[in-house]
Amino acid sequence: MLDFLLRGVAFLGGAFLVLTTILSAIRSFVLPRNESVLINNWVFMLTRHTFSFLAAQRNTYAARDRVMSLYAPVSLVMLPVVWLILLSFGYTGMLWAVGEGSITTSYILSSNALLTLGSVKAATVLGSICTFSEATFGLLLITLLISYLPTMYQAFTRRELVVARLELRCGTNRTATELILWLNRTGSLADDGPQWETWEEWFVEIEETHTSLPILSFFRSPQPGRSWVTAAGLILEASAVIISTVDQKRDPQMELCFKAGCIAVNRVARYFQERARAEPAVPLDDNNPIEDPTRIDFLHTYDQLSEADLVLCADREEAWQKYQELRVRYREAIQFLAKLTMSPDLKSIG
């Protein structure tokens, strides 16, 4: 009787482990919404702590960036490995429960079926059913990952295309002031609807892809000095300064872009704050590059824009207050994501 109960528990426990693993894969790559998957969180967090420790041993940001550039790819590759290991353990319990021999024999049979080697065959009908289903699920998990890799890299490419183009517009200093001055020099400051529309679409895609496939947030740009978080911050800063400071006709497309950006960065940040609970273990840079602008910084930007012959709001204090009201909508989210993803040289205005 005790043996029967033990085998029943082993079968149910193994079936639960198998079902949990399969559902984790489906929720990760098939379900089109931002689900928090416990197995994935464990894998990502363990890998993150490992890479954070290795990066902390480096003395420069460039060296840490090289280390952390491997974090997302390695985590993604580790997922199917962990899934297959869990499947193997789950089916080991099920095969032992249906009478396929000792735990060792059941594990060998399970691993053989999982890898579709075919060198060991089950001794019972129930064992054969288990091994066939295990082989099917093993192939399914690998297929899911392989089929979704192109999808993720397409999203990554589209994201980085906007990041690279933005760098051409805001210069090497990568500040909102430089971006506004470029828009002014090209004559597109007051009428650049297509550009703001492009950035709005970029923010909408960031919100969708970086919450449904959160590992995308940690794929680093090909160039160490670039980051999607930095790019998002620059666009939002430029929008906030223009709306609060530049005296021109309202631009609905720019305001929509600003709203889409605030929603996107806050939802991505909220995903990690509420679910992943990931805290950065590596300092962002030798100097703390996350700068919270003071009133002096804002007035310096105001003077720069005035020297460029932009028509500005006459009341600088009122412009400062409005800028602060706009910036509070995205400031914390951008700073959190910058720390989480180790973004380089994140500046605001100035």
Image (cartoon, rainbow, N blue to C red):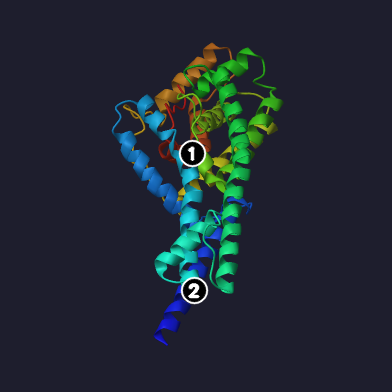
Q: CA distance from mark 2 to mark 1?
A: 34 Å
**Numbered mark located on residue 73 in the image:** 1
Residue projecting furthest to the bottom = 1
Residue 147 rendering spot, x and y as whole percentages: 63, 44
User: Which circle marks residue 332 in the picture?
Assistant: none
**Total numbered labels placed on residues in the image:** 2
Q: Residues within 10 Å of mark 1 (few under 14, many from 20)?
A: some
Left/right placement of residue 59 relative to residue 221 reads left
Judged left or right of residue 179, residue 44 is: left
- Which residue type does callout 2 highlight? Phe
Q: Residue at x 50, y 36 (%)?
A: 219
Crowding near the residue tagged with mark 2, few <14, some 14–19, many ≥20 C-alpha atoms within 10 Å: many
- For residue 244, side relative to residue 64 (left or right): right
- Residue 303 versus residue 101: which sits nearer the camera? 101
Dot placed on the residue nearer the N-terminal end, 2 or 1: 2
Q: State which quarter of the image contains the C terminus.
A: top left
Q: Going by the image, does 279 lie left or right of 240? A: left
The reply to whether residue 300 is visible in this rendering is yes
Q: Nearer the viewer, mark 2 or mark 1?
A: 2
Q: Nearer the viewer, residue 277 or 330?
A: 277
For image coordinates 57% across by 49% down, the residue present is: 142
Residue 304, placed above or below residue 160: above
Per the rendering, the mark at residue 11 is: 2
Secondary structure under tag 1 reads helix
Residue at left offset 50%, top offset 65%: 91
Q: Is residue 289 above or below residue 271?
A: above
> In the rendered image, which quarter contains the N terminus?
bottom left
* Residue 329 appearing in the image: no
Q: Position of residue 292 (x, y in %)?
A: 41, 32
Query: What type is the residue that disc 1 sits on?
Result: Pro
Percent position of residue 77, x then y: 49, 43
Residue at the (58%, 58%) spot, across then down: 135
